[in-house]
Image (cartoon, rainbow, N blue to C red):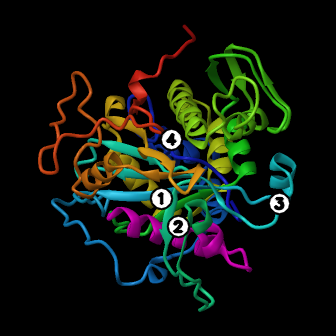
């Protein structure tokens, strides 16, 4: 990610987005520990960290219909309506990123996740889009007035196409967002996106003191910065974690497909959720500041996600989201008839997107959940396909090996 950096979205084992939920009390903590003047300076520093741009004007007018609001919440101006946020991991390889991933020209979306927040904020659903998924990429307008040509290619090329020769992250995010809208029928009402880079990801993991992960088998991947890991419970620091979630080829990494890597990324995100929930950052002001500084300095985001008050309001409306209703899913796909190294969406994918557009669950309700099963579009589909994985709930991820 370009001028960006940090991290994918985090969900707490019991609540969604614990980093932001814990930020609710940040102002009070900062004032008590630092004094009012210092707290103001810290807020200013954190706000300045975030690179932000509004891409609404680049999405055009031929877009899916907007969802109506059903209620209002003074803390979250978007409460009462479903909210879709596009999370992108950029493989830009310049500066510090080159040392982590090898220097390569241009930028593509190494990871793409559509995060859907239900209108009642009772559910959060993260749908991963394989980078090798073949889609129709529309003509994308850039902030300098240039227009790319429409073409058919793998999904991660949308980010590169939008970035153009000037390598503008906001333009890249806008083209990726427009591509999602036109291929799925869902709409990003608030044009929200977050982009993170390799080095930003590393900073966030290190700010948390590393993430404990259960490695199912020995791994040896020369292509992933010579990653070697033994099976069992391991604590991964930032550099090791970025290699782990990006590795595709080598011993212990399955078939080397992007969908296999996505499954590993989702497990790592779930482990990160647990790690954040286990750390009582509010009782450790220096640790809280280190984390928030790493998080905000690593993000390129839309204005609605770039302000501390906006994030606090969103966290407030999500604070009671149960971990059983935080679901990860990979878009159901199958090998492309035209190229066995690429994939295409299946009919099960269409059902997933239809349910998201209708603000219905993408998977059957978790055991013990009060969430109703979908009915307007039909029962949530079983997403298991030749290149698909069953839904993963944060509450279902084991906290230890075995």
Q: Position of residue 326 (x, y in %)?
A: 37, 36
Residue at disc 3, secondary structure: loop
| Residue at mark 2 to residue at mark 4: CA–CA distance | 21 Å
Provide residue 160's location: percent of width, then percent of height: 65, 69
Callout 4–callout 1 Cβ contact below 8 Å: no
Q: Label 2: few (<14), some or many (≥20) within 10 Å?
A: many
Q: Nearer the viewer, mark 2 or mark 4?
A: 2
On residue 86, the disc is 1
The residue segment tinted magenta is 159-185
Could you say which disc has been placed on residue 10 in the image? Answer: 4
* Residue depth check, mark 4 versus mark 1: number of the one nearer the observer: 1
Task: Tell me which residue sits at (46%, 22%) in the image.
Answer: 397
Front disc: 4 or 3: 3
Instruction: Report the residue that reaches farthest toward the top.
Output: 402
Give me the disc on residue 314.
Answer: none
**Quarter in which the N terminus is drawn:** bottom right
Residue ranking furthest to the front:
337
């Amino acid at each position: 990610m370009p001028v960006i950096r940090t991290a994918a979205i985090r969900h707490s084992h019991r609540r969604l987005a614990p980093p932001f939920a814990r930020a609710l009390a940040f102002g009070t903590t900062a004032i008590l520990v630092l004094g009012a003047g210092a707290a103001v300076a810290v807020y200013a520093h954190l706000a300045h960290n975030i690179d932000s741009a509004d891409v609404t004007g680049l999405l055009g007018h031929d877009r899916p219909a907007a969802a109506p609001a059903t209620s209002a919440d003074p803390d979250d101006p978007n409460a009462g309506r479903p909210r879709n946020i596009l999370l992108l991991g950029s493989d830009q390889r310049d500066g510090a990123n080159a040392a982590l991933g090898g220097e390569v020209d241009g930028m593509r979306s190494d990871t793409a996740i559509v995060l859907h927040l239900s209108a009642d904020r009772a559910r959060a659903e993260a749908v991963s889009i394989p980078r090798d998924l073949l889609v129709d990429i529309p003509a994308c307008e850039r902030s300098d007035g240039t227009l790319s040509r429409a073409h058919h290619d793998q999904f991660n090329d949308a980010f590169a196409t939008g970035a153009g020769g000037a390598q503008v992250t906001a333009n890249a995010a806008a083209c990726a967002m427009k591509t999602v809208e036109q291929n799925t029928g869902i709409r990003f009402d608030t044009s929200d996106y977050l982009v993170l880079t390799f080095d930003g990801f590393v900073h966030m993991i290190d700010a948390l003191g590393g993430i404990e992960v259960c490695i199912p088998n020995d791994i040896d991947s020369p292509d992933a910065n010579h990653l070697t890991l033994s099976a069992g419970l391991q604590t991964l620091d930032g550099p090791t974690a970025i290699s782990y979630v990006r590795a595709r080829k080598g011993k212990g990494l399955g078939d080397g497909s992007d969908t296999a890597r996505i499954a590993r990324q989702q497990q790592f995100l779930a482990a990160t959720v647990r790690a954040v929930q286990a750390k009582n950052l509010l009782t450790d002001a220096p640790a809280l500041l280190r984390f928030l500084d790493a998080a905000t300095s690593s993000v390129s985001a839309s204005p609605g996600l770039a302000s501390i008050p906006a994030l606090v309001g969103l966290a407030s409306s999500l604070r009671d989201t149960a971990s059983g209703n935080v679901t990860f899913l990979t878009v159901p796909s199958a090998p492309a008839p035209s190229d066995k190294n690429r994939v295409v969406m299946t009919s099960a994918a269409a059902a997933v997107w239809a349910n998201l557009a209708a603000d219905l669950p993408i998977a059957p309700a978790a055991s013990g959940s009060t969430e109703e099963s979908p009915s307007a579009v039909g029962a949530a589909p079983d997403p298991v396909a030749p290149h698909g994985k069953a839904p993963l709930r944060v509450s279902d991820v084991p906290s230890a090996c075995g």
